[in-house]
Image (tube, rainbow, N blue to C red):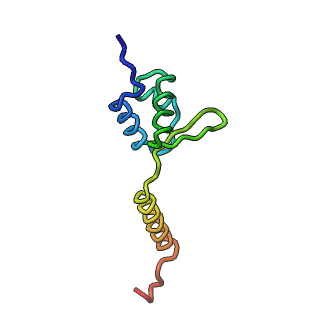
Amino acid sequence: MSQSKVGDPEFQARVVELLQNATMPVSVDYIAHNLSVSWTTARAILFELSMKDRIKAQKTSKSWIFWMPESESEGVRKKALQVEANCVLRKKRDPAPSSML
């Protein structure tokens, strides 16, 4: 007898973990493949999590994509890393004149 994964908190946690580790929004196919469930089951779980505001969803021209909502602290951290990267690039591009060394 097969037990439904839709509504199962432990399985939902696995979906959330997979989304947290993703570097970009993912498709229903991605979740289905990585968790070895049918496309229909993956879609149902993703929509359920989206309705509970645990994940974000967006309709594309082809299908749907899903991702984790960005927390405020993650947004601040990403902005800090971007500023740091820009400073490093600027230093490489505009080195200090030798008279200043």
- Quarter-of-image position of residue 17: top left
From this viewpoint, which residue is outermost toward the top?
1
Left or right side of 64 for 15: left
From this viewpoint, which residue is outermost toward the front?
52
Q: Which is more toward the observer, 9 or 78? A: 9
* Residue 76 vertical position relative to residue 9 in the rendered view, above or below: below
Q: Residue at x 40, y 86 (%)?
A: 101
Q: Which is more toward the observer, 20 or 47? A: 47
Q: Which is more toward the observer, 35 or 86? A: 35
> Which of the image's four quarters has the N terminus?
top left
Residue 83, x across and y down, in percent: 47, 68
Q: Which is more toward the observer, 101 or 16? A: 16
Residue 8, x across and y down, in percent: 36, 28
Left or right side of 85 for 13: left
Residue 71, x across and y down, in percent: 43, 54
From this viewpoint, which residue is outermost toward the left?
10
